Amino acid sequence: MKRYLRYLVPLLLIASFTTVACLSDDDDDPTATPADATATEAAEAPTATSADDADVDGDAPTGPIEAVSHAEPSISALAESDRTIYVATGATITWTNDSDSPHTITSDDGWFHQEIAPGDSFEWQFNEPGTYPYHDELDDSIQGRVIVVASAAVAAEYFEGKPVADYFTDACGGCHGPNREGATGPALVPGRLTSDDDFYFNVIADGRPGTVMPAWEQLGLSDEEIWGLVGYIRTEPDADAVKWELDEIAPTLEVLVDESTLPDEPQHTGNIDNLMLITERESRAIAVVDGDTNELLAHVPASYRAHGYTFDPTNERWAYNVGRDGWLFKIDLYTLQAVRKVRVGLDSRGLAMSDDGKYLLIGNFIPNSAVILDAETLEPLKVIETVGASPSGEVVNSRVCITSDVSMEMVGPYFLIALKEAGQIWRIDFSDPEFPIDKIENVGNILHDGFLSPDNKYFYVASQTDNWMAVIDVEKAELVEQIPTGDTPHPGSGAVWEADGTTYGATVHAAEGKVTVWDLATNEIVGTVPTAGPGLFLRAAENSPYVWADALFGDPSNTITVFEKEAPFEIVGVIDDGVMTLHPEFTDDGEFVYISDWTGNTVRVYDAETLELVAELTDIPAPTGIFNTVRRHEPLGH
């Protein structure tokens, strides 16, 4: 559990520190002891002694947590940023009062107390691992804590040793914005954080019931890591632009296997039209399971948190996956191995393939862009910067939150992308080598997932802070309707079905426990289905009688609601196996449903009609998204 959390939660070192080569090994007192119990002149404080030393400036660090041997936070920095300091056992901290008024450094637990006059300093040595909170008795805005670790190696292992920006972007950026500017979640910048540190610690530790904010302490996050997160959100964000253009992408292309040497038929016993590709969230791998027999066929090495999948509609052997770290893989389903890879961005999400099998389009969070590649070779062809005017008129850099392709035969040779912050849908013509763009503005605020109608004439996209599903006429490239479905719609890859002569669409919601169903012909809401709490995914299949919806952020978080396709959409059962269940996916014949148990490290298989458990796969660690190869034939987008 801890390993999985360390990927999910941001790395949180707060200050830049001044370091010295060594300190005394005085262990007479097993607790924190003063190096000098009286205030000293600032000029006498220890100074930097190596070229790598830096003054405390409140900037967020760019590397893993470092347990330093000495740190020198100032009173002004404590008021703005340096709330959490990681040090090695035996380290000293020197606090300097650089203000015009007196302050105190007072241990919450009684270890130390010192009033510091303007220009003076106070130093203390920490000889025992632990967390030492302190405050200023004269200024409520100043507080902090020193986290003492047994060794520098222990600190470096926090959050798998990744930089703070990488962790925050991956774990929290989806809701709070990549630069903490806010999206569906509030902005996490110092100017908005008006409560004390204990308040934010408790929110992170306990979560917010009924929302997508989980209780990280229950999931295994340590106090040291939570305090690190509190300290990180007290720093000013760095919003510098990131460049990742054709010149950066092209050199990363790597041929892993010579495709001319590949066999002409599958080298395994699985049904190529019924393979389940399952993200192993923390293992940098994709599990491949035969949907006919529930046999685990392989673990295909991939990259960090395999996220988007697409399948070649013209050739059954090829699948594609992009990880959140921007690495795109071309996967051979005959031999169950990646044959090519290329890095298309630094933080990627969506992936789509043109209906003719020639092009791939990937949507990036960082940098804000869409990338078009040759599907056969993975050679990059074009980078499209995604900048546009939001519904409020502000020109913003915008993440690409959904990518889809449109059938050439039904409507036209188009890719569709949604610009999250700009609230726009862009239609890209992939039949023209210049890839011209038609832009649909004022679609909504904070766009997210979406899906196509079966005839591809309409695209339904979630506008999450407006609480509606926007309806786009794909052929005319215009907004035609806004369906008020509920709090923070999150349709995933979509659930569309036909019953009694009516075609329905539906979405779950990330901020309330219900499914909303509407008639695709009229865009009128025709029913709702209660669930155990907020969810992320629901799924239907043409040859199965029921719709399945998760409630990943419910309490408990292990319920799957199954309801009838016909109005009034009565619930036929609720499955409550496992710990944290999500992402139902049907087999190709619609007879069985696979469900991931994320923290239960299990994939369960159910009879789609009786809801009976028929199999458990326990050798797939931290499973999340499940995608069947039958999706290559779906009209909702590849």
Image: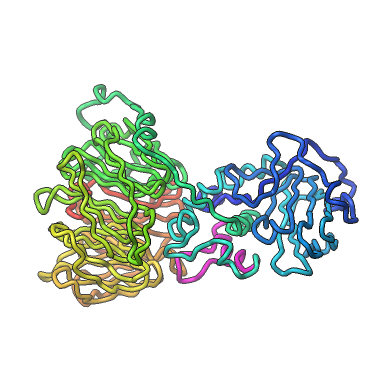
- Let me know if residue 597 appears in the view: yes
Figure coloring:
rainbow
* Residue 131 painted magenta: no
Q: Is residue 267 above or below residue 43?
A: above
Q: Quadrant of residue 269?
A: top left
Residue 52, x across and y down, in percent: 68, 36
Q: Nearer the viewer, residue 435 or 209?
A: 435
Residue 275, x across and y down, in percent: 27, 44
Residue 386, x across and y down, in percent: 33, 50
Q: Is residue 229 left or right of residue 245?
A: right
* Residue 213 painted magenta: yes
Residue range in magenta is 198-221
Residue 444, x across and y down, in percent: 31, 66
Residue sitting at x 75%, y 64%: 135
Q: Is residue 434 left or right of residue 489?
A: left
Residue sitting at x 35%, y 69%: 574
Q: Main secondary structure of the magenta part?
A: loop
Residue sitting at x 31%, y 34%: 336
Q: Nearer the viewer, residue 372 or 259?
A: 372
- Let me know if residue 611 appears in the view: no
Residue sitting at x 80%, y 47%: 92
Q: Is residue 318 left or right of residue 193?
A: left
Q: Quadrant of residue 247?
A: top left
Instruction: Farthest residue to the front: give it.
Output: 100
Q: Is residue 276 above or below residue 339?
A: below
Q: Nearer the viewer, residue 540 or 485?
A: 485
